[in-house]
Image (tube, helix red, strand yellow):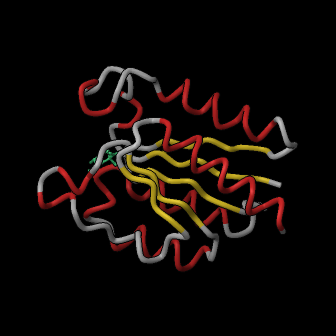
Amino acid sequence: MSVLLINGPNLNLLGHREPAVYGTTTLAEIEEQVAAAGAAVGVDVACFQSNYEGAIIERLHAARTDGTQFVIINPGAFTHTSIAIRDAFQAAEVPFVEVHISNVHAREAFRHHSYLSDLAVGVIVGLGTRGYTLAMSFVLERLAKG
Ligand code: DQA
């Protein structure tokens, strides 16, 4: 069984970027935590981060056929702009959870809309970097149920 964790633009700077908003945990630490949760129950985790919209789209295309059973994604700012990533999810037909570290609804109006949320199985918003492991725990429960 296999889960794909995708992080979008600027999230490679987690831990250093606006720590008051995004905290001090690095992306490497998050990836390690999510992978460890998977490994504990025999689920592989593939981690992918890109600052490029097209690279994320191509990774989703690959997920159609590479055995990915669930995606956890923080699309970063592409959340609010990318119809193309939305279309890629519809093409990939892989279920996903959308994660946002900050409470986007308590921030600027342009962060209130997501092009992905209505396609997502669920959305975790504003619970800090803990949102990733919470999403993973939900995904593992889903996969265990089959
Ligand atoms: C974010 C929220 C987005 O609005 C922002 O562009 C990000 C991070 C979050 O995790 O809170 O890059 O997705």
Q: Residue at x 35, y 26 (%)?
A: 23
Does residue 132 sit above or below 63 in this rendering?
above
* Quarter of the rendering occupied by the N terminus: bottom right
Which is nearer the eye, 52 or 83? 83
Q: Residue at x 73, y 31 (%)?
A: 36
Q: Is residue 108 left or right of residue 128?
A: left
Q: Measuring from the top left, give residue 20's x and y in whole percent.
A: 24, 26
Q: Residue at x 60, y 73 (%)?
A: 92
Q: Is residue 45 left or right of residue 133?
A: right
Does residue 96 sit above or below 39 in this rendering?
below
Q: Residue at x 33, y 60 (%)?
A: 79
* Quarter of the rendering occupied by the C terminus: bottom right
Does residue 80 sit above or below 26 in this rendering?
below
Q: Measuring from the top left, give residue 30's x and y in whole percent.
A: 55, 31
Q: Is residue 9 left or right of residue 38?
A: left
Q: Is residue 61 left or right of residue 122?
A: right
Q: Measuring from the top left, give residue 120's x and y in whole percent.
A: 50, 70
Which is nearer the eye, 93 or 25? 25
Q: Measuring from the top left, give residue 75's x and y in whole percent.
A: 40, 53
